[in-house]
Amino acid sequence: MKRNTWQREAVRGALDANDGFVSAQALHSALHASGSPIGLATVYRALADLAVKGDADSLQSPEGESLYRACSTNLHHHHLICRNCGLTVEIEADAVERWAKDVAAKNGFTEAAHVVDVFGLCAACTAKAAASA
Amino acid sequence: MKRNTWQREAVRGALDANDGFVSAQALHSALHASGSPIGLATVYRALADLAVKGDADSLQSPEGESLYRACSTNLHHHHLICRNCGLTVEIEADAVERWAKDVAAKNGFTEAAHVVDVFGLCAACTAKAAASA
DNA sequence: TGTTACTTGAGAAGTGTTCTCGATCACGTG
DNA sequence: CACGTGATCGAGAACACTTCTCAAGTAACA
Ligand SMILES: [Mn+2]
Ligand SMILES: [Mn+2]
Ligand SMILES: [Zn+2]
Ligand SMILES: [Zn+2]
């Protein structure tokens, strides 16, 4: 049902080449910059597909933009993200998982999902900020 | 510096009258429905001000819309939100606070902030969904 | 009550994302 | 290795949410 097109491969490749979270538009720009004529709508579609398949993680930036990343594992986990350069650290947190499940159950909520992300400035960006201040 | 206008009061009042998170547009519709001629831009401005002052909490819905709520406390806390009716439960989680701080520090991140929200179906909405299924 | 600067609101503009639909192309079939 | 067909593509239109512009209105203060 799902065809293999160079466009899909290009998007997956661009995602893999990036180690932080990136937006669809940034990815499209990067692809264009490297000579690809891929369309923006196609990038959006490919990213959405990857996210559905579990091959990419997605989250919303504090500004409301959807960001994507090819994670090393498709198991459930969370992220520590540099809001300046996008550098991402994958984090596990069993305690938080349990807490989220408990707090939902205790309040009678079902079908609970949680959003848990930590944003900050990575060590490098912190140093850079201090130097330019 | 900040003037008192009936518009600002109206927005605050409408927020207070709502016990769940609401969007700027929903609030504007509600105000209009009750006869207020307040402008949409003004609602956005008032909500942004309230959020800055700490008089309202804001978060992004999974769909990317900004939602606001007049919370009972202005201390830092998180929310358990019904994705169907907006019903919100305020939750504290010292363990999660500590975890977020630790994970950032351990990875060399500074100026860390965290997004922690739990979305689900409240008991009432769960019952309703089961009945109509 | 007059001055002045802040606020408002209608509509334009901006931004991120999705939709439309004719052209293109992957891929199973013969 | 054609061929047929339906999935996929892409340019631009359409959308949804949010912010900006600026003329008109008004709160605040002397
Ligand atoms: Mn989790
Ligand atoms: Mn917290
Ligand atoms: Zn960084
Ligand atoms: Zn509910």
Image (cartoon, coloured by chain):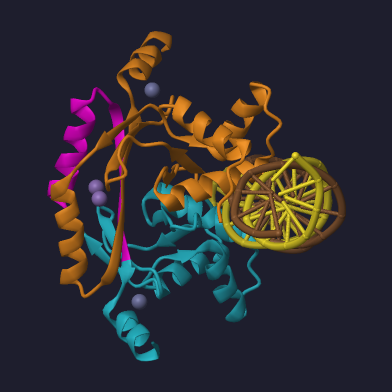
Chain colours: A orange, B cyan, C brown, D yellow
- The residue at 49%/51% (across/down) is B48
Is A40 colored magenta in this rendering?
A: no
Above or below for D9 versus D27: above
Above or below for A75 versus C30: above
Q: Nearer the viewer, residue A94 or A7?
A: A7
Where residue A20 sits, quadrant-wise, is top left
* Residue B97 seen from this side: yes
Q: Count the marks: how many? A: 0
Above or below for A65 versus A19: below
Where residue B109 sits, quadrant-wise, is top left
Magenta region, residue range:
B93-119
Q: Residue extending furthest top?
A: A131
- Could you tell me residue B65's position as x and y percent? 51, 57
- The residue at 38%/18% (across/down) is A125
- Could you tell me residue A77's position as x and y percent? 27, 44
Q: Is residue B127 left or right of residue B67?
A: left
* Residue B1 seen from this side: no
- The residue at 39%/63% (across/down) is B69
- Could you tell me residue A54's position as x and y percent? 39, 48
Q: Is residue B30 left or right of residue A79?
A: right
Above or below for A10 versus A33: below
Q: Quadrant of the C terminus of chain B?
A: bottom left
Q: Nearer the viewer, residue B64 or B14?
A: B64
Q: Nearer the viewer, residue B113 or A81?
A: A81
Where residue B73 sits, quadrant-wise, is bottom left
- Could you tell me residue A95's position as x and y percent? 13, 49
Is B103 colored magenta in this rendering?
A: yes
- The residue at 38%/26% (across/down) is A87
Q: Residue extending furthest bottom?
A: B131
